Image (cartoon, helix red, strand yellow):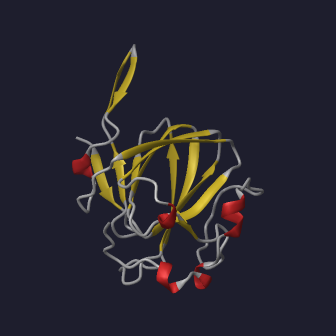
Amino acid sequence: MPKIVPSSTIADVVHVEPDVHGDDRGRFVETYRRSWLPLGREMIQGNRSEKQAGAVVGLHYHLHQADYWYVLRGRARVVLHDLRRGSATEGATEHVDLDGDEDRGLFIPPGVAHGFASLTDVLLWYLVDGYYNAADELGVAWDDPDIGAEWGIVDPILSPRDTANPRRCDLDPALVPNVGLRT
């Protein structure tokens, strides 16, 4: 049986340690099952992200979309920050290292800002429970001192989008998520 572990830092975040089966031919891993995830969310789209060592992506967040991340190759430092007003863990930051050799998944609910640093070249496979919606692609500064992210990279490679995101204290109040968001 896979091990499904609720985060001890951020409410509704779930760590998944699936069963791994292997022999001389290789290995088999069931990476996702809907019943493992909370909040009754159905993943409807799969995505692939490849980043070179030293890249930082995020911090991004959605008002309506949940993510399920799984690193297939390489090692990534994931940073999560609970932006949800009214959450028991509002303002909490969690760091999680995902490694393609360790087979672990991570469920991220709406309203939790998320990003990752490529500690090596990384291949990240992720599922989402909503189709792309530009109005729900939001961000907060990757280096906001109030968030206290520890990326594990000294001189990150960043996108123009990620360098332009506002600090948490400067977010438009209409774009600050509330606990219990649904699409």
User: Can you give x and y, in whole percent of width and height, for residue 106 in the image?
Assistant: 41, 52
Residue at image position (64%, 59%) is 151
Q: Residue furthest top?
A: 24
Looking at the figure, which quarter contains the C terminus? bottom left
Q: Which image quarter: residue 85?
A: bottom left
Residue at image position (70%, 69%) is 164
User: Can you give x and y, in whole percent of width and height, for residue 116 in the image?
Assistant: 58, 54
Left or right for 36, reference 175: left
User: Can you give x and y, in whole percent of width and height, for residue 52 in the image?
Assistant: 68, 41
Left or right for 107, reference 95: left
Left or right for 9, reference 144: left
Nearest to the observer: residue 128 or residue 91: 128
Residue at image position (47%, 76%) is 83
User: Can you give x and y, in whole percent of width and height, for residue 1 in the image?
Assistant: 22, 40
Q: Tell me if residue 165 comes above or below residue 134 in the rendering.
A: below
Q: Tell me if residue 135 comes above or below residue 104 in the rendering.
A: below
Q: Which image quarter: residue 172?
A: bottom right
Visible residue check, residue 64 = yes
Nearest to the observer: residue 46 or residue 8: 46
Count the numbered circles shown.
0
